[in-house]
Amino acid sequence: MVRVHTTRQLEDEQHDRVLAFLDAAHTLDCARLDDHLRVDLAQGPREGFVAALAEDDTGTLVGYGQASVGNAGYVIDAIVWSLYEGDPDEATSSMLAALLGELPPEAAVSWWAHPESHELAAQLGLQPDRRLLMMQHTLPAGLTAEIEVRPFRSGVDEQAWLAVNNAAFAEHGEQGGWDLATLRQREAEAWFDPDGFLLHERDGRLAGFCWVKLHHPTQERHCAPGEQIVGEIYVIAVHPDFHGLGLGRQLTVAGMNHMEAEGATSAMLYVDAANTAAVGLYRSLGFGTAHEEQSYRRPPRRNT
């Protein structure tokens, strides 16, 4: 039987224990905590953080769940590793229910299920929402970017980048509404490399960017087989004032060229399936869908 308890502040020993559990779950099962939550856990936590720890009868940590504030409410996630001898769905449900019970009813809540689970979501009162495509492309791609880009400068470019990001992702649950503290969290991550954070300026303004993240075999998050470096288009956007100029395509190519120069043999990205323009762009560049992920949402409850 699993026991779940929640906390808004992990003690140092608990924090280390959770990080070790997540690393082990990734190694064993390729399980990954939502990136937004993992950064909040590692670099935060920020206000609104809630953790759910699931232990078996021996006191062993067999599952971890977390809630963190997003752009339009909360994001939640939960992982149970394969060494747990009980019912993993029951443990996942218990952690998610505990997290939902800690969150204000007037706040919207999103859960990215992995794998998708319509039945579990329905039990928790969550409705199907966004669908995410993970797309891949082998490198080299043989494409040439026709725009100039430069690396991000820490301590100089933050405010200009935040303006572009938040304008481009105004309605996005995880990527929108970033502040300086959120960006600083990413800059503090071990994988952060300003040389792969490519900016394009036009008419004296930052017009768009392609932020590349490299996954090396020893730290791969995507769990692809082999010993090759995989490049991820972590975030890409064009300010709405510069839409219609083909910058999204050119920034994507610039990002792929950077990956190739760094030794990557494949490129990957995540894109909302409902963003048909972006999906069409990536398909036209040769990306194919490797798998899909489903999110579920608890709408905010309005007072009547």
Image (cartoon, grey):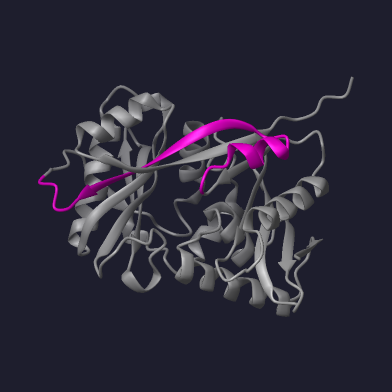
Task: Confirm whether residue 199 shows in the render.
Answer: yes
- Residue 72: % across, % down: 65, 35
Q: Is residue 70 magenta?
A: no
Which image quadrant is residue 152 in? bottom left
On-image quarter of the C terminus: top right
User: Is 167 situated left or right of 95 in this image?
Assistant: left
- Residue at (27%, 49%) from the top-left corner? 255
Give the total number of marks visible in the rendering: 0
User: Is 14 situated left or right of 79 in this image?
Assistant: right
Of 167 and 124, nearer the camera is 124
Q: Is residue 126 above or below residue 20?
A: above
Task: Confirm whether residue 48 shows in the render.
Answer: no
Which image quadrant is residue 270 in? top left
User: Is 254 situated left or right of 153 in this image?
Assistant: left
User: Is 187 situated left or right of 69 in this image?
Assistant: left
- Residue at (56%, 68%) from the top-left corner? 22
- Residue 219: % across, % down: 40, 70
Of 276 and 43, nearer the camera is 276
| Magenta residue span | 115-142
Q: Is residue 139 magenta?
A: yes
Q: Is residue 208 above or below residue 275?
A: below
Of 136 and 113, nearer the camera is 113
Furthest-right residue in this view? 304
- Residue 184: % across, % down: 55, 58
Which image quadrant is residue 172 in? top right
Q: Is residue 160 above or below residue 8?
A: above
On-image quarter of the N terminus: bottom right
- Residue 276: % across, % down: 37, 25
